[in-house]
């Protein structure tokens, strides 16, 4: 709902539809008939936030209740924020137009460390005290979830409650409790004491942190009603978990304008650099019938012309070919495309290729991650050069003319030979096109190489490793460019300074809260966007706070160091991660979960069960 004070601003901004609400399938309720109002905040632009599956699930979940109303809130772009501040317009929920400070629960999904300053900016713009110590009344309660909260310590100055793990069940439990305490007229502290007793709820202020003289963590001490460690929540049965029957349909194009079908959670692979592959364990699949039904319902309710299958590794779904055949029965006659992101080169079969030939052909994307076999073994990619070449040959034969390859640079044990290996492997992928007699004549092939800068993350075997310096990454980027000798191979890579900040915040402690606060005061926001990122702001903030980025990013950690995220239990044994780290330095691999269970410990979160184990 667009309120009067907002209307005059809309014709002065780039994309007014970001701020109007009123889209198809959005939910509007009578605020006087609900007991709790929930603002789901995505700390980035509308186009990115509206593409996020977690938002769609929790928006639908909360609005399925008669006693609660969930609205969407996104970070306004610079042009709109300027006008809002000049005209005294507070950040508001899209459904009602009411300011953020009027909501009971304010939930942020933390998908990326470089969105932290946007959290502060959104709270401030919505007239909510930025620092949690300045919030005195029972509501609003500021909550954070998402992958970044596996180490929430850098943002604990601003967040009242942290929800590690999956939110479908714990969100309802938290809403029930807050409604109860609103009706009783409880104090903020009384509510937080009871909330700390809910499994999977972390109340940062109920933990005291002590530091050693060298700046490392000495001790975490739990206070009040808080447990010693907080175990993440998971949803055991995805077939019966809440999933939307319709999505809100934006008026403008978003990053992902399509139906999204979630096929499974977790990953069987154990790539040592990949945080998601560890923190989303144990592996749990949906049935093909469930996915097919959910995709068809959403497609009918939205009119989207594409269905995308969502997981960390879609081709690892055990019923993938059955699922595709089910989807094609209705998708092809209805002229709906089916997209399969996250394909693996080591299980890309002829059968899967033949099914994909039935749909519109865009480029295929694969992720070898490293250019040499030694380094692929070190990161436990379990992909060979033969796998990559075989898959490329199948794709060229199948009529595709473009392939995108994802790599990383700055990986532990990496050398310049490994960087050159990226160019060499890409050239071999291109060469196989011309060696393939079944290729489609008259087309010009292209190989796109995308290189991300490696960032060590918590709950991975590389959480002890130093991050590559910006100077080293720049040298490697230059070496890669000089090693590519074909115009049909294009290379792109990430800005190294943003990767440095990401690494600092990913493994940071509570002391970084004052750095984030100062950087925001200096104007930092939308730090993941090149046009906004100002590294000098951050360096000044570190200096003024007496801290250095190098302490967090570039030093080797000892195996016995206490980490800021040790207060969280994501199910993965630390001993297992240490073993994996040692194997990485010897370039030894670990089989994927379906070949052999490696006893990582995550099955304890699901009653001792892990769907990836051999039955």
Image (cartoon, helix red, strand yellow):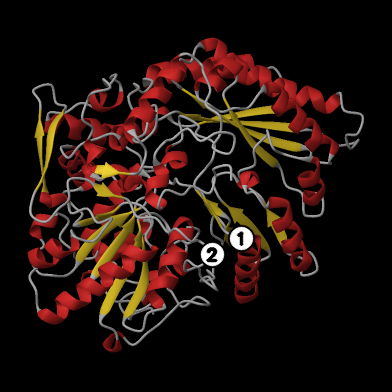
Which numbered disc flags the more N-terminal residue, 2 or 1? 2
Mark linked to residue 596? none
* Residue to which mark 2 is pinned: 239
Q: Is 426 left, or right, of 558 in this rendering?
A: right
Name the outermost residue toward the front. Answer: 615
Q: Is 212 left, or right, of 117 in this rendering?
A: left
Q: Is 50 left, or right, of 77 in this rendering?
A: right
* Residue to which mark 1 is pinned: 287
User: Which is more toward the observer, 206 or 87?
Assistant: 206
Quarter of the image holding residue 550? top left
Residue 62, given in percent of the width and then of the height, sits at: 37, 73
Residue 400, given in percent of the width and then of the height, sits at: 79, 40
**Residue 488 visible, this orientation:** no
Residue 356, given in percent of the width and then of the height, sits at: 77, 50
> At 27% across and 71% down in the image, what residue appears?
175
The answer to whether marks 2 and 1 mark residues whose Cβ atoms lie closer than 8 Å is: yes
> At 74% across and 33% down in the image, what residue appears?
391
Image position of 183 with respect to 375: above or below: below
Residue 610, given in percent of the width and then of the height, sits at: 49, 47
> At 91% across and 35% down in the image, what residue appears?
441
Give the distance between the C-alpha atoms of the residues marked 2 and 1, in whole angstroms: 7 Å
Image position of 465 with respect to 33: above or below: above
- What element does badge 2 sit on? loop
**Residue 470 visible, this orientation:** yes
Query: Is disc 1 surrounded by few (<14), some (14 to 19) or many (20+) residues within 10 Å?
Result: some
Quarter of the image holding residue 577? top left
Query: Is disc 2 surrounded by few (<14), some (14 to 19) or many (20+) residues within 10 Å?
Result: some
Q: Is 436 left, or right, of 205 in this rendering?
A: right
User: Which is more toward the observer, 348 or 362?
Assistant: 348
């Amino acid at each position: 709902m667009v309120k009067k004070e907002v209307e005059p601003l809309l014709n002065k901004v780039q994309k007014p539809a970001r701020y109007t609400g009123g889209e198809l399938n959005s939910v509007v309720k009578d605020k006087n008939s609900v007991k709790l109002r929930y603002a789901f905040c995505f700390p980035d632009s509308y186009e990115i936030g509206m593409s996020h599956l977690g938002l769609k699930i929790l928006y639908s979940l909360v609005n399925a209740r008669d006693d609660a109303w969930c609205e969407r809130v996104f970070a306004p772009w610079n042009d709109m924020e300027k006008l809002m501040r000049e005209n005294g317009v507070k950040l508001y929920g899209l459904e009602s137009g009411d300011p953020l400070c009027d909501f009971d629960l304010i939930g942020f999904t933390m998908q990326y460390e470089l969105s932290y300053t946007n959290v502060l900016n959104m709270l401030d713009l919505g007239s909510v005290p930025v620092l949690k110590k300045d919030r005195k009344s029972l509501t609003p309660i500021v909550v954070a979830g998402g992958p970044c909260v596996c180490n929430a310590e850098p943002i604990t100055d601003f967040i009242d409650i942290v929800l590690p793990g999956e939110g479908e069940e714990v969100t309802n439990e938290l809403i029930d409790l807050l409604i109860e305490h609103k009706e009783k007229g409880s104090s903020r502290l009384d509510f937080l004491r009871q909330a700390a007793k809910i499994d999977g709820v972390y109340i940062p202020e109920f933990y005291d942190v002590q530091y050693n003289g060298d700046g490392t963590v000495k001790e975490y001490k739990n206070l009040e009603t808080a447990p010693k460690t907080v175990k993440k929540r998971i949803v055991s049965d995805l077939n019966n978990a809440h999933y939307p029957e319709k999505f809100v349909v934006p008026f403008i194009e978003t990053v992902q304008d399509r139906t999204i079908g979630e096929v499974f959670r977790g990953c069987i692979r154990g790539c040592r650099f990949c945080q998601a592959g560890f923190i989303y364990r144990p592996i749990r699949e949906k049935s093909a019938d469930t996915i097919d039904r959910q995709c068809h319902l959403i497609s009918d309710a939205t009119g989207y012309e594409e269905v995308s299958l969502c997981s960390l590794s879609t081709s690892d779904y055990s019923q993938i070919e059955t699922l595709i055949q089910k989807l094609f029965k209705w998708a092809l006659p209805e002229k709906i495309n089916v997209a399969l992101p996250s394909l693996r080169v080591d299980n890309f079969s002829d059968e899967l290729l033949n099914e994909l030939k039935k749909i519109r052909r865009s480029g295929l994307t694969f992720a070898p991650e490293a250019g040499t076999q030694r380094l692929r073994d070190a990161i436990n990619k379990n992909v060979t050069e033969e796998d990559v070449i075989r898959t490329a040959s199948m794709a060229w034969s199948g009529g595709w003319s473009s392939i995108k390859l994802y790599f990383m640079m700055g990986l532990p044990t990496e050398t310049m030979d490994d960087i050159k290996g990226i160019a060499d492997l890409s050239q071999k992928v291109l060469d196989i096109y011309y060696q393939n007699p079944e290729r489609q004549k008259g087309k010009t092939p292209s190989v796109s190489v995308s290189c991300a800068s490696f960032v060590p993350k918590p709950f991975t075997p590389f959480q002890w490793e130093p991050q590559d310096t910006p100077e080293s990454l720049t040298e490697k980027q230059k070496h890669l460019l000089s090693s590519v000798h074909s115009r049909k191979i294009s290379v792109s890579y990430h800005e190294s300074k943003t990767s440095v900040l990401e690494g600092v915040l990913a493994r940071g402690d509570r002391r970084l809260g004052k750095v984030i606060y100062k950087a925001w005061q200096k104007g930092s926001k939308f730090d993941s966007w090149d046009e906004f990122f100002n590294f000098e702001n951050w360096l000044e903030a570190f200096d003024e706070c007496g801290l250095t980025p190098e302490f967090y990013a570039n030093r080797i950690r000892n195996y016995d160091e206490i980490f800021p995220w040790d207060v969280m239990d994501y199910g993965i044994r630390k001993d297992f991660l240490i073993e994996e780290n040692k194997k990485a330095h010897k370039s030894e691999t670990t089989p994927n979960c379906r070949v052999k269970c490696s006893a990582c410990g995550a099955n304890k979160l699901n009653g001792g069960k892990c769907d990836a184990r051999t039955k």
